[in-house]
Image (cartoon, grey):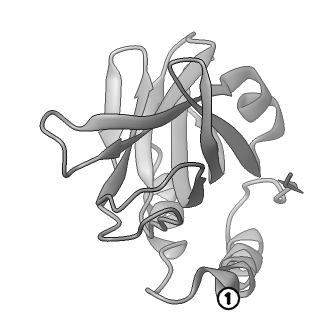
Amino acid sequence: MPGTIILKPLEAKIAFESNSDSYCVATIGKSIAKSSMSRNSGNFPCWDDAMIVRTGDEPICLLEVKDKDVQAGEIIGAAEIDLKEVTERGKMTKWYELYNKNQAAGQILVEIAYSAGEYPPDSVLYAESVKLSHEDPRSRSHEKQKSLDRLSEEDSIPEVDEESK
């Protein structure tokens, strides 16, 4: 279903020893978006920005975690996000398994929202309002919930359904 997908990678748990400067790349069809870099984050990178990607009828969003320290951005791990689930639910936060060459590489927590149409103005408001300050990831859930509570009062995006492993 055509529209706009807003992906906000929150944090990851990398399964192998890592000293990387990691970032995320979201790909839906020919649309690609890149996150900021989580510098020297080791096995537990965190990000504080959102990626906005247009979607057509593609069934999958490929979300890759890459290492900036390696030439051409070596893939640490990748997850496939079912866009049908996202479009049906409207908004969700979920842990996804990361794989690299069919081997488990860790997990990534992603907040995802869907809006019908092309780049609606409320998506920009949403993307800007969920930015979190640089702080300990354990305190993120409280700050994230405050942002989401504020959003649910102001926007017409459905409530968050948090799932975690």
In this view, which residue lies farthest toward the left? 71
Q: Is residue 119 left or right of residue 164?
A: left
Q: Quadrant of residue 106?
A: top right
Q: Is residue 88 left or right of residue 74?
A: right
Where residue 14 appears, as percent x and y from the top left, is 55, 52
Where residue 89 appears, as percent x and y from the top left, is 82, 39
Q: Residue visible at 32% across and 58% down?
A: 20
Q: Is residue 150 above or below residue 19?
A: below
Q: Residue visible at 84% across and 59% down?
A: 159
Where residue 141 appears, as percent x and y from the top left, is 73, 79
Q: Quadrant of the N terminus?
A: top right
Query: Does any portion of residue 117 appear in the rendered image?
Result: no
Q: Is residue 57 above or below residue 103?
A: above
Total numbered labels placed on residues in the image? 1
Q: Which residue is mark 1?
A: 139
In this view, which residue lies farthest toward the front? 17
Q: Residue visible at 68% across and 73% down?
A: 154
Which of these two is toward me, 28 or 25?
25
Which of these two is toward me, 152 or 32?
32
Q: Is residue 116 above or below residue 51?
A: above
Q: Is residue 156 above or below residue 138?
A: above
Which of these two is toward me, 90 or 92?
92
Does dot 1 land on a helix, a strand or a loop? helix
Query: Does any portion of residue 27 appear in the rendered image?
Result: yes
Where residue 28 appears, as percent x and y from the top left, is 45, 22
Q: Quadrant of residue 36?
A: bottom left
Which of these two is toward me, 129 or 11?
11
Q: Residue visible at 56% across and 12% down?
A: 58
Crowdedness near tag 1: few (<14), some (14–19) or many (≥20) residues, C-alpha within 10 Å: few
The amino acid sitting under disc 1 is Ser
Q: Is residue 158 left or right of residue 34?
A: right
